Amino acid sequence: MATKATKASSKSSKPKSQARSTPASSTSRVEQARAAAQSAVDVPVGAVLEVSDRVAELVEPFSGRTAAQKQLKSYGTQLRRTVKRSERRGATARRKAATEARRTRNKVEREARKRQRRVETTLKRNRTEVEQRVRKAIEVPTSRAQELVDQVGDQLASLR
């Protein structure tokens, strides 16, 4: 049938746009459909074979009692190692976080003490300055008043 289709397509003198509907192009469509159908069947079959191989790999260590015990012991060892590794990493992270928190706390406390000292020093300086100003403010009028009292006393003494 394919030979008749090729002969018919070679004898046709139709333009290219009409040549696509010849029996030869329908044969290639059939081939494409056949290839697609084979691919559609081959993929699931290949997947089943792959799964089968993997199951066989999983089951193989458990084929005998001693092999199964050995494999289970190996799994236990791997699990213990993994848990220990996780524990070490967790402990390291915890220690690192605690150290960082301690450093931060010390830094904040140090800064607070520094600021407190600065405030106390400024307060003491301001207090001393204010006390001196108050003393001066009190002494000047007091000394002036004393001078006036002395003058008045002298004048009274001279009158007597």
Image (cartoon, rainbow, N blue to C red):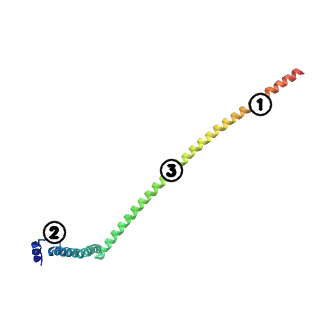
**Residue under label 1:** 142
Dot 2: within a 10 Å radius of its alpha carbon, few (fewer than 14), some, or many (20 or more) residues?
few
Q: Position of residue 5 (x, y in %)?
A: 12, 76
Q: Position of residue 35 (x, y in %)?
A: 20, 74
Q: CA distance from mark 2 to mark 1?
A: 128 Å
Q: Quadrant of the C terminus?
A: top right
Compared to residue 107, the image places residue 141 above or below, namely above
Q: Nearer the viewer, mark 2 or mark 1?
A: 2
Q: Amino acid at mark 1?
A: Thr
**Residue under label 3:** 104
Q: Tags 2 and 3 in contact by the CB under 8 Å rule?
A: no
Q: Please, which residue is most extreme toward the front here?
A: 14
Dot 1: within a 10 Å radius of its alpha carbon, few (fewer than 14), some, or many (20 or more) residues?
few
Q: Amino acid at mark 3?
A: Thr
- Specify whether 139 is left or right of 111: right
Q: Quadrant of residue 91?
A: bottom left
Q: Quadrant of the N terminus?
A: bottom left
Element type where label 3 sits in the image: helix
Q: CA distance from mark 2 to mark 3?
A: 82 Å
Q: CA distance from mark 1 to mark 3?
A: 56 Å
**Residue under label 2:** 16
Q: Quadrant of residue 131?
A: top right
Q: Please, which residue is most extreme toward the top here?
A: 158
Q: Nearer the viewer, mark 2 or mark 3?
A: 2
Q: Which residue appears at 79% of the width and 28% of the height?
A: 146
